[in-house]
Amino acid sequence: MRILYILLALLCLAQQAFAGVKLEAVYPYNLDKSAAHVVHGGSTMPLFINITGFDVPHEQPAHLRVILPEGFKALANDKWRLGSADGRQTAEADWVLPADFGQSFDLLYIQPQTDLERGSKQLLVEVSGEGWNERKELSFDYEPAAAAAVAAEPTQGKKLDRSKFNWYIQSVTLPVDNLGNKDDRAAEGVVFIRDTTLEGFRNRMTGDGATNWSAVFNHPATFLVLDMRNPQRDVRLLKFKAELIDKKTGKVMPGLCTAGKNNEDSEHGWAGDTGSVNETTALISLDGKKTQAFIIPLYVDYFTVLEGDYSLRVTVSGNGQEKVQEVPLTIAKKHNLGLLAVGFSFICLLAVLAFSYKLKGCIYRIGARGAITVALFAAL
């Protein structure tokens, strides 16, 4: 028994000895986790910070301090406090690390000036807490922006509008399939959606039961290709939003929704209430390439959407910047009434064939004038 007590004591001491905090910092950080060691002039790239706490029985505060290289600045947000020290900008934040085991992480977006010299730069990350201190120095290469992006100011004295060198929307193409391929047989800008008017009645008549509206709403009506241009090679997360706009009034019209919406009478789906009304939203990430295409699903609220011609307004925003582009869009339904008309005509044809032996006598009985009248109504 005494040996067991000694082993338990040694185990507790070992657990306390190995308890601690691990700091992970990467800059420049690519969202696709590929290697990136070069920062281009004018680009906005994130600093990734991850703090892992393990075998600590209680929550503990942690103070973060990032010292940027000279000529670099952090983009302001609510989580970080910006300052300066020795001519270099600093960013500080206070975190609370979870008890036992857990991770806390965030992205700090950093942008260099465009007139810096090419060379190696250093960035320092410090984290301190109750009796511990971690620091990591990151080295990377800085490459000035292209000559076209940093051209001298015009002789008229006007400042160069650098906003046009930032990321922007090149084009929006729809409809396409889930691989981004466009069907040449489909008209551009026309989206056909299913007609749910007789959906429930048809399912009950065929024995399929009630319509699974959750599956209907969670299936995209179509896909679109968002072609983005990124001359400054930014790496950042952006929010995508698509809305239906009335061409005459310019107001947002109902008809689009998110994948989490089921219908007006039931609870929300697996995604829950996203707070988005009459719009389809998504998150996209720029990975530092000059050109990038995104295939984004477009969800339709079948209970509120109306057929007609609209403008599809696509908005891409992030870090205080917003780009908007509108493309024409036509909503058309695949009506089931056409199938009913064809079915009724087929039934009439079968009835005529079934009573064809009486057709000759009927014609003699109604005469030529009656036959002409019947033919006229048939033509109408």
Image (tube, grey):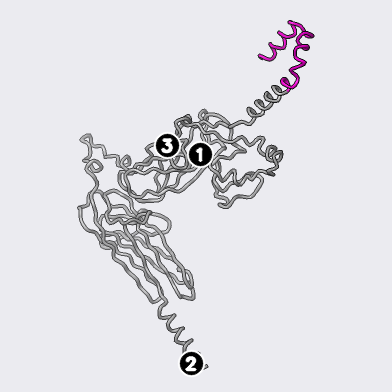
| Residue at (55% x, 29% y) in the render | 308
CB atoms of marks 1 and 2 within 8 Å: no
Q: Label 1 sits on what residue type?
A: Thr
Q: Residues within 10 Å of mark 1 (few under 14, many from 20)?
A: some
Q: Residues within 10 Å of mark 3 (few under 14, many from 20)?
A: many
> 153 or 319, which lies in front?
319
Instruction: Residue 105: give x, y in percent of width and height.
Output: 42, 62
Q: Secondary structure at mark 2?
A: helix
- 157 versus 31 height, above or below: above
Q: Earlier in the sequence, mark 1 or mark 3?
A: 3
| Residue at (32% x, 61% y) in the render | 90
Q: Residues within 10 Å of mark 2 (few under 14, many from 20)?
A: few
| CA separation in Å, label 3 and label 2 | 73 Å
Magenta stretch, residue numbers: 351-380
Query: Does 338 sit left or right of 238 as displayed?
Result: right
Query: Does 349 sit left or right of 128 as displayed?
Result: right
Q: Label 3 sits on what residue type?
A: Val
Pair 1/3: label in front: 1
Say which mark, if any, is on residue 96: none
Instruction: Residue 172: give x, y in percent of width and height.
Output: 42, 37
Say which mark, if any, is on residue 172: 3
- 112 versus 250 height, above or below: below
| CA separation in Å, label 1 and label 3 | 13 Å
Q: Is residue 164 magenta?
A: no
Instruction: Residue 175: give x, y in percent of width and height.
Output: 47, 35
Pair 3/2: label in front: 2
Instruction: Residue 126: give x, y in percent of width and height.
Output: 34, 67
- Name the residue beneath numbered marker 2: 3
Query: Does 230 sit left or right of 173 as displayed?
Result: left
Q: Is residue 377 magenta?
A: yes
> 4 or 357, which lies in front?
357
> 209 or 48, which lies in front?
209
